[in-house]
Amino acid sequence: MREYQKYLEQVNALQCNGSRPFAMPVSVCMDPFSKRQIALYDFNRDHNSITNDEWVAWFKSAFEEDPQELDVLKQRLQRAIRFDTESWTRTVHKQLQLQRNKVLKSDVFRYVNWLRIFAAGHQLYVGLGDESTPSPAAKPVEAARGGKRQVPRREGSREDAAQNNGSVGGRCDRAQYC
């Protein structure tokens, strides 16, 4: 509807004293499939029998809001969103105690810029340190006896190929042309 209103404003801007330009009706600007579905379910009649004024009224009804619904939505959002400012203030105070951040106390502009950057990082990683559990300790690797490194053998390795006359899979007979 906003696009149609923009279109109407542009057409009406071209209006002269003696003539009025032709403006397309709303129903012409709609997708035919959507128009049929809306007419069937919302108007409960054929899409050809709905006038232009009815289409305009139907589209403009979307702009009307029930204040009760907005209040309910606002209450739900207030209940859902809770900010934990205590952890934020604690981490900022800890960071300001560091020697590298002492200069920020005397320069407000540098402090605000630092705070913006620090706040973005804090929002991303605030709870990750507390929630993560340490991974289980890796098993120590025992050294091989005799000082020689033990490598597990694969099937079809180079040694097997040398023993089998160049064939990895098994013994090669000359009659098979392998």
Image: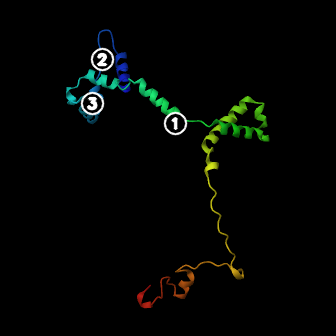
From the image, state whether disc 3 or disc 1 is nearer to you.
1
Closest to the observer, 22 or 47: 47
From the image, state whether disc 2 or disc 3 is nearer to you.
3
- The percent position of residue 173, horizontal first and vertical second, equals 45, 90
Which residue is tagged 3? 42
Residue farthest to the top? 17
Q: Are marks 3 and 1 in contact (CB under 8 Å)?
A: no
Residue sitting at x 62%, y 59%: 135
Q: Earlier in the sequence, mark 2 or mark 1?
A: 2
On screen, 78 above or below 172? above
- The percent position of residue 115, horizontal first and vertical second, equals 68, 35
Is 81 left or right of 140, judged from the image as shown?
Answer: left
Mark 1 is on which residue type?
A: Ala
Q: Earlier in the sequence, mark 3 or mark 1?
A: 3
Label 3 packing within 10 angstroms: few (<14), some (14-19), many (20+): few
Colour setting? rainbow
Which residue is tagged 1? 80
Closest to the observer, 49 or 27: 49
Closest to the observer, 86 or 7: 86
Label 1 packing within 10 angstroms: few (<14), some (14-19), many (20+): few
Mark 2 is on which residue type?
A: Pro
Q: Is residue 117 visible?
A: no
Locate the N terminus and report the quarter of the image it occupies: top left
**The disc label shown at residue 21, or none:** 2
Q: Quadrant location of residue 25? A: top left
Residue sitting at x 73%, y 29%: 108
Label 2 packing within 10 angstroms: few (<14), some (14-19), many (20+): few
On screen, 75 above or below 123? above
